[in-house]
Image: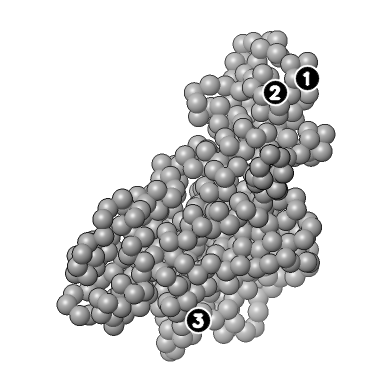
């Protein structure tokens, strides 16, 4: 997709349903006289993933204003001069006037730069800027360091979390026993052998008496993430509320362990707090949600988070009518294609280790397993929402069909069609009845759900030569 095609999609996202500026788009009604402020905006777009755009012809209240030819020429000329002369590197920008719902909008595109961070000319890295929640802000020292490391080809997992350590320090800070337990191997008798094995996995680096723990080693096997200055904010928090909103909190629990050390305990803790006690012959907990779904969606949140985003932690929020799992970073795949597309991870080494240690699927079947488990319990479909700075997955307990919204029925039907297609089959009326736990006499209800889903464009008829609706089969729109 060219930047011009993307420009109109991004503008649409910023104007509806509630008008708001995005990190990759800045509305402007006219050319500002403050060249230093414009330089900061351009600098921020240069440092932003995918670059960014000015959209001239839009007021702060999201209303449109028409620009003259002279204004457009002046804007393009001025921004071009600032991009070439006011930053640490000369930047080439592009522009185009595109029609949006009949309104001509001047888009000025600033591409992401390969060598980052870009900063203001005559200054140093401390005058680098970024875009956060639609605003241009000065980058923190930590953001600058991480961006430099990324530009140098050093992934998050490969960066050093703590340096200047002895072998004894490494073994004290990391839970090496858990590593060998997960690998189903005996713990070596010597410290040298243990550290050598951890080094092979990329959890620590060094030689002789000078060792460092990598981010990968710390994020997976830390005995306490607070021991690592830059990773304390990566702890997982579980919050449980009274009722359906966050006004009354029952508790807030922060996990301190690395993900591999604390993962199963985290899942157990969540399941305990989303279950109801059933008193029969023996007391037992009856889960409102499938453990597989909780496990897979939490693992996905851990693996696919964006470590370059600060201020958003991985959170599992438990309400009386839903669970919300949030992780920093928008999904890299289309949210409508998460079931069938292979995973696209920001953190390949983390994803690989979580797979090798048995916590998640690397071939992309984790979401499939979660959705299938939800179907088996006849629950409403999981709602996966892509937001500018994060991904939210919402899970729901049982609802009677009459209490489900039209949108919930449509999403469940679509996800069902995706799962059936992955099995090499096509969805039909009978399979939809089974998905919603409907009787054979309720085929008309299933037909209504299919029709509503087809109307949204999410599914299509697979066998177009068949006229009788009861014999028709359906596949997802992308087949």
Circle 1 or circle 3, nearest the eye: 1
The answer to whether 37 appears left or right of 18 in the picture is left
Mark toward the start of the polypeptide (2 vs 1)? 2
Q: Is residue 196 above or below residue 343?
A: below
Q: For the residues marked 2 and 3, what is the alpha-carbon distance in whole angstroms?
A: 54 Å
- Disc 3 residue crowd, few under 14, some 14–19, many 20+, Cα 10 Å: some
Please tell me which residue is depicted at 68% across the width and 19% down the height of the picture: 429
Tally of numbered discs: 3
Q: Position of residue 462 (x, y in %)?
A: 59, 20
Please tell me which residue is depicted at 75% across the width and 70% down the height of the picture: 60
Whether residue 50 is visible to the viewer of this picture, yes or no, is no
Q: Nearer the viewer, residue 279 or 384?
A: 279
- Disc 1 residue crowd, few under 14, some 14–19, many 20+, Cα 10 Å: few
Query: Which image quadrant is residue 241 in?
Result: bottom right
Q: For the residues marked 2 and 1, what is the alpha-carbon distance in whole angstroms?
A: 8 Å
Q: Dot 2 lies on which element? A: helix
Please tell me which residue is depicted at 82% across the width and 38% down the height of the picture: 403
Q: Position of residue 98 (x, y in %)?
A: 63, 55
Report if the CB atoms under discs 2 and 1 are less than 8 Å apart: yes
Q: For the residues marked 1 and 3, what is the alpha-carbon distance in whole angstroms?
A: 59 Å
Q: Nearer the viewer, residue 474 or 311?
A: 311
Q: Which residue is mark 3?
A: 140
Q: Dot 1 lies on which element? A: helix
Q: Which residue is mark 1?
A: 442
Numbered label attached to residue 134: none
Numbered label attached to residue 433: 2
Q: Nearer the viewer, residue 115 or 301?
A: 301
């Amino acid at each position: 997709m060219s930047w011009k095609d993307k420009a109109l999609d991004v503008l649409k996202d910023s104007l509806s349903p509630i008008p708001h500026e995005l990190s990759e788009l800045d509305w402007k009604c006219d050319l500002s006289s403050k060249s230093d402020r414009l330089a900061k905006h351009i600098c921020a777009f240069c440092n932003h993933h995918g670059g960014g755009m000015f959209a001239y012809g839009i007021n702060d209240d999201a209303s449109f204003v028409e620009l003259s030819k002279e204004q457009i020429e002046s804007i393009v000329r001025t921004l071009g001069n600032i991009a070439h002369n006011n930053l640490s590197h000369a930047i080439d920008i592009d522009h185009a006037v595109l029609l949006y719902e009949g309104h001509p909008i001047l888009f000025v595109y600033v591409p992401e730069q390969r060598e980052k961070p870009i900063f203001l000319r005559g200054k140093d890295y401390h005058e680098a800027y970024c875009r956060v929640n639609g605003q241009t802000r000065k980058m923190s020292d930590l953001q600058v360091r991480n961006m430099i490391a990324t530009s140098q080809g050093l992934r998050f997992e490969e960066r050093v979390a703590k340096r200047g350590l002895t072998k004894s320090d490494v073994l004290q800070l990391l839970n090496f026993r858990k590593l060998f337990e997960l690998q189903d191997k005996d713990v070596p008798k010597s410290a040298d052998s243990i550290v050598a094995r951890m080094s092979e996995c990329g959890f620590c680096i060094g030689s002789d008496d000078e060792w460092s723990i990598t981010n990968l080693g710390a994020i997976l096997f830390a005995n306490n993430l607070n021991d690592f200055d830059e990773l304390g904010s990566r702890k997982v928090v579980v919050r449980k509320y009274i009722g359906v909103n966050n006004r009354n909190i029952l508790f807030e629990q922060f996990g301190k362990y690395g993900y591999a050390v604390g993962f199963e305990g985290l899942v157990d803790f969540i399941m305990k707090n989303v279950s109801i006690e059933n008193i029969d012959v023996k007391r037992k907990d009856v889960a409102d949600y499938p453990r597989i779904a909780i496990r897979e969606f939490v693992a996905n949140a851990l693996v696919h988070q964006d470590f370059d985003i600060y201020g958003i932690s991985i959170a599992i929020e438990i309400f009386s009518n839903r669970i919300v799992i949030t992780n920093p970073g928008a999904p890299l795949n289309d949210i409508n294609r998460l079931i069938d597309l292979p995973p696209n991870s920001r953190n390949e080494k983390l994803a690989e280790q979580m797979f090798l240690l048995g916590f998640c699927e690397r071939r992309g079947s984790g979401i499939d397993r979660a959705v299938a488990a939800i179907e088996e319990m006849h629950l409403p479909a999981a709602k996966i929402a892509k937001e500018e700075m994060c991904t939210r997955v919402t899970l729901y307990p049982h609802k009677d069909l009459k209490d489900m919204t039209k949108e919930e029925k449509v999403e469940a039907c679509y996800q069902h069609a995706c799962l059936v297609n992955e099995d090499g089959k096509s969805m039909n009326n009978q399979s939809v009845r089974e998905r919603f736990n409907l009787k054979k006499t309720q085929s008309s209800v299933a037909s209504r759900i299919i029709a509503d889903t087809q109307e949204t464009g999410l599914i299509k008829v697979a066998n177009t030569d068949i006229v009788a609706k009861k014999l028709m089969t359906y596949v997802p729109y992308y087949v």
